[in-house]
Image (cartoon, grey):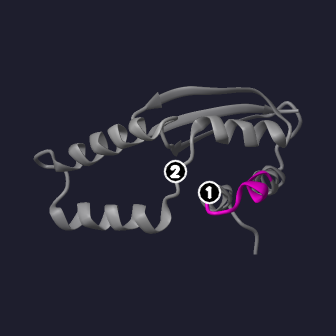
Amino acid sequence: MEKTASEYFGARARLGPERRVECVQAWSEQLDLAPGGHFVFADQMRGGAEAYHAINWGRMTDFWKRPGHLVQEERDSLTEHAELHDHYVTAVDQLRWMEAVGFTELDCVWRNWMWGILSGRKS
């Protein structure tokens, strides 16, 4: 059974550094993007410094607590999910991995707290 790009993205951060580029290569091939094709994706990302990641995580959890957003049970579930499954990496690391497998014209075209949109063109 073939994996989706999302599954490859989710797996990449759990791998050791030597396997991350291999994982990005696999999803790049899976997407079957033609040379010159433009790839754009959104993901949660770690801040470049641990202090920034902590600030962004705090902003996100504060947002969850606003009236009408999430009840405690939902917040606990999201926190547990993040601890078990989300392995945030920096935009810089993700762009380096894309470059290593041949993407060019790399950019972080939008960033807000923990969310970002990265893009690149397949060479």
Q: Earlier in the sequence, mark 1 or mark 2?
A: 1
Relative to 82, is 96 on the left or the right?
right
Task: Look at the image and tell me in which quarter the C terminus lies.
Answer: top right
Instruction: Indicate the amino acid at tag 1.
Output: Ala
Q: Is residue 26 magenta?
A: no
The answer to whether the residues at label 1 and label 2 have Cβ atoms under 8 Å apart is yes
Residue at 55% in and 34% down: 117
Can you see residue 40?
no
Which of the pair 92/98 is nearer the observer?
92
The part of the chain drawn in magenta is 14-21
Q: Which mark is residue 13?
A: 1
Secondary structure, mark 1, is loop
Residue at 69% in and 36% down: 95
Residue 86 horizontal/vertical position (percent): 49, 59
Residue at 76% in and 69% down: 2
Relative to 24, is 56 on the left or the right?
left
Residue 58 horizontal/vertical position (percent): 28, 43
Residue at 60% in and 59% down: 10
Task: Look at the image and tell me in which quarter the N terminus lies.
Answer: bottom right
Instruction: Indicate the amino acid at tag 2.
Output: Tyr
Can you see residue 2?
yes
